[in-house]
Image (cartoon, grey):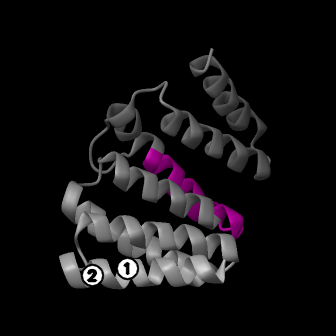
Amino acid sequence: MAEAEAMYRRALEGKEKAWGPEHTSTLATVNNLGLLYKDQGKMAEAEAMYRRALEGKEKAWGPEHTSTLATVNNLGNLYANQGKMAEAEAMYRRAQDGRSGSHVSTGEKAWGPEHTSTTDTVNNLGVLYKDKGKMAEAEAMFRRVRNENS
């Protein structure tokens, strides 16, 4: 994984020089570096990368873009892995129903209720609720995933 990290860092450096730190291609690499850091157990570094990617994607594409929502879901996964259940739930909820001022389901609006990205986030919420002992809520999420995939 050290080799992968070096390659991502080199790619990030090149993209920042060529296109700047806010370019969407640069931000995709920032997000991917966050994924790698998470896999390496470098949680603080992963969070910093995800936050940077999220901030840039919100500026470039807005809060409802599929790429923005994917990074929101990544932050939810990171927080869940750290046992930060309230933060994880907030990220999953935002990715799933994205109530950022409106009452429109952004995840579902962006991808539709049956898209794998939507059902992945709903499943993540189900796992989170199960881990918190909220069995009724967990069951509702798991049923929804099953119904959307059948």
Q: Quadrant of residue 56?
A: bottom left
Q: Nearer the viewer, residue 133 or 113?
A: 113
Question: Is residue 84 positioned above or below 142 on the image?
Answer: below
Q: Position of residue 62 (x, y in %)?
A: 23, 55
Q: Which residues are magenta?
A: 80-95
Taking the magenta stretch, the answer to whether it contains residue 68 is: no
**Camera-side residue of 112 and 131:** 112
Q: Does the residue at mark 2 contact the one at mark 1 (Cβ under 8 Å)?
A: yes
Q: Report the residue at 55% width, 76% height from top.
A: 46
Residue behind mark 2:
16
What label sits on residue 12 in the rendered view?
Answer: 1
Residue 113 appears in the rendering: yes
Instruction: Indicate the amino acid at tag 2.
Output: Glu
Depicted 98 relative to depicted 118: above or below:
below
Q: Is residue 7 above or below residue 76?
A: below
In which quadrant of the rendered view does residue 120 lie? Answer: top right
Q: Is residue 130 left or right of residue 4?
A: right
Let me know if residue 54 appears in the view: no
Taking 96 as reference, is 21 left or right? left
| Secondary structure mostly seen in the magenta stretch | helix
Which residue is found at the position 56% from the left and 34% from the top? 119
Of the residues shown, which amino acid type is indicated by label 1? Leu
Dividing the picture into quadrants, the one containing residue 81 is bottom right
Count of marks, rendered view: 2
Indicate whether residue 81 is drawn in magenta: yes
* The disc label shown at residue 67, or none: none
